[in-house]
Image (cartoon, rainbow, N blue to C red):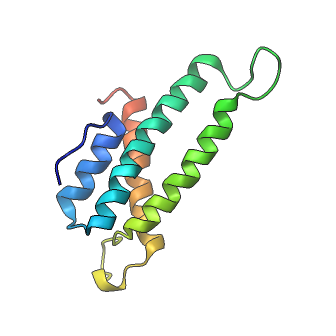
Amino acid sequence: MNKPEYGPAGAEFYESVVKEFDLSPSEEAALDNAAHVLDYLDELHRGVDEHGVITPSGRPSPLLAEIRQQEAILVRLLGLLALPSGGDEDDNEATASSGVSRAARAAARARWQKARGRY
């Protein structure tokens, strides 16, 4: 699979997964979408950081609803990847939830590194 263009969070996540796992075509599609969602979430979080969680009219920022929706999409995409959790588990016994946990940790690590200016 040719590497699509991603932002920092998406690129790091994409690279960490393809470096370690052989993916089926459907998993490659889920990975591509997940990487794009991570980048989109970064943009949304920057918008909240810039404009705040409350609009000038006193209402919650519409970005918050979009963040929740994108996070829900990300969880579903990560579940489709069903990556093994590592450790002592046999790869054949890995569950989707362990894949979500591993992918979620990678996504969180990418966000924290970005927040700390490590990109």
Give percent across and percent down for residue 21: 22, 65
Residue at (59, 40) in percent of width and height: 67
Q: Is residue 48 above or below residue 36?
A: above
Q: Is residue 21 above or below residue 65?
A: below
Can you tell which quarter of the image residue 9 is in? top left
Can you tell which quarter of the image residue 88 is in? bottom left
Residue at (46, 33) in percent of width and height: 42
Which residue is farthest right?
58
User: Looking at the image, can residue 36 be seen?
Assistant: yes
Give percent across and percent down for residue 24: 26, 69
Q: How many marks do you count on the picture?
A: 0
Quadrant in the picture for the N terminus: bottom left
User: Looking at the image, can residue 90 be seen?
Assistant: no
Q: Nearer the viewer, residue 89 or 104?
A: 104
Quadrant in the picture for the C terminus: top left
Q: Is residue 58 above or below residue 26?
A: above
Give percent across and percent down for residue 116: 39, 29
